[in-house]
Image (cartoon, rainbow, N blue to C red):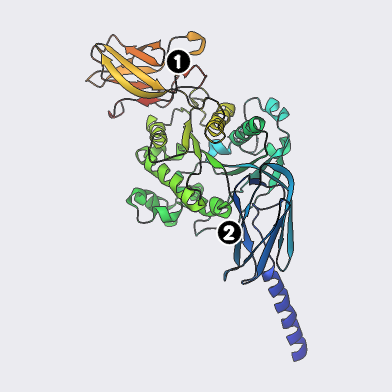
Amino acid sequence: MNTRIKFLVLFLMCCYLGTSYSKVTIPSIISNNMVLQQQTKVNIWGKANPGEKISLESSWTQKIYSTVANESGKWKIQIKTPEACRNQWIEIKGENQIRIQNILIGEVWLCTGQSNMEFPVAHNPKEKWKTGIINEEQEMKDATFNEIRLFHVAHQLAPEGEKEDCEGEWVVCNPENLKDFSAIGFIFGRKLYKTLNVPVGLIQSTWGGTHAESWTSMNVMKNNPLYEDVLKQYAPENLKRKKDVAKVPSTLWNGMIAPILGYTVKGNIWYQGESNSVRYEKYAQVFTNLINDWRKQWKQPNMPFYFMQIAPHYKQPAGIREAQLQVWQNNKLKNIGMAVVTDACDSTDIHPRMKQQAGERLAAWALAKQYKQKVAYSGPVYKKMKIKGNQLILTFDYAKNGLTTPQQSPVNGFYIAGNDRIFYPAKAEIQQNKIVLTAPEVSHPVAARYGFGTFFRVNLYNKEGLPAVPFRTDSFEEK
């Protein structure tokens, strides 16, 4: 090959590489069929040639937005969104042109956590634990919604650092697309859609068997004594089993949250905690740090964060549920709430199939707090205790219309103790929003517990039909 031909080949290769590099690209989360959060500013971002001018037009405004890619080739544009609407488009122009179509403007929510949020609508025979939502066939009959859109972030580990993109696509909600989508997410989104009558976008980012530290950015954990044991235990060089890779601190933040970070959302629903139960005494602070971290990183300091208290199970200690309750009752955290499923659990299956209660109760929090709907959103919560002779009198919040049990059956699940710290089953009498407890073995009661164990059967509700939150009034060591 002579010199002129070599030069020509080299020139053409350079032109090709230059053209490829300068091509404007956008992440998978920004694509056809997406839902953008209404009546706010949303972020649209991507990559291009450094210094390349990027312009953006949309169907709902005559304004043309523009920016210039930075020295790393990254660019971002914020655009205002209108009230909920359908069939919109965005056009992005640089060296090339991208048109994003079939966009909805409505309400966008994250659905995150471990396996109980990952648990799909449909049974998957290839994965034993994915047994499908109870009444799956009936639920699938009510599963076609053109104005509910789903984005499922594919599993991606990234222990080495944050990823810029992930695999996934926005799809229309229908029985086929729902098969492997979060059952809780679907029930939650369907409730919002039917109540608000606006488009709903659901973004699922989940991985079963993972602890909260996997979902927390390393900036929060490095040099923090709270995480010293976890950082050491799950350091790559100390891993003994392949499946433990998904528990490496920050690996799921890096691989499954960072790529969608900045996509403007209304809020987040979260179901996780089982994998932190071995360190439940630290979970309240670990989870609080995660919430604050996500809000800061998203630049949405008041992002709603509603979470499930994990269901009773024979391997799950009471301490993990108590830690979750402490997070909810933390006065420094705003816009958070906890839903309870003490009546939708399975003693031996950590993945109970009754996901309707979980999804509906998380939706109640969102509807009441974010959308100002007049709906009950919490079951009874212990407020205070009074000792009167051989009686303990407990008062509850979220029970202004009174307490009750199904079919007015006797109340189950209360225990009381005296100064000997031995707890005995208690007889419970309902008096409006109060419970009066007595036990023949306890003449001078000093403490009470309700549903405080691994697995238990309890039956106290408020008149709106929401179950009471498990609790204890004491701080004794567990017996």
Q: Which mark is residue 430?
A: none
Which residue is pictured at 66% across the width and 59% down the height?
26
Residue placed under numbered mark 2 in the picture = 164
- Is residue 67 visible to us here? yes
Which one is in front, 161 or 308? Answer: 308
- Note whether 252 is above or below 388 in the view shown: below
Residue 214: percent from the left, percent from the top?
Answer: 47, 48
Is 401 left or right of 124, judged from the image as shown? left
- Earlier in the chain: of badge 1 and badge 2, it is 2
Farthest residue, direction front: 62
Mark 1 falls on what kind of element?
loop
Q: Residues within 10 Å of mark 1 (few under 14, many from 20)?
A: some
Is 445 left or right of 7, judged from the image as shown? left
Which one is in front, 114 or 64? Answer: 64
Alpha-carbon distance for marks 1 and 2?
Answer: 51 Å
- Note whether 186 is above or below 409 in the view shown: below
Total marks shown come to 2
Residue 278: percent from the left, percent from the top?
Answer: 39, 38
Residue 227: percent from the left, percent from the top?
Answer: 37, 49
Q: Residues within 10 Å of mark 2 (few under 14, many from 20)?
A: some
Q: Which mark is residue 402?
A: 1
Mark 2 falls on what kind of element?
loop
User: Mark 1 or mark 2: which is in front?
Assistant: 1
- Assign the N terminus to one quadrant of the image: bottom right
Which one is in front, 438 or 135? Answer: 438
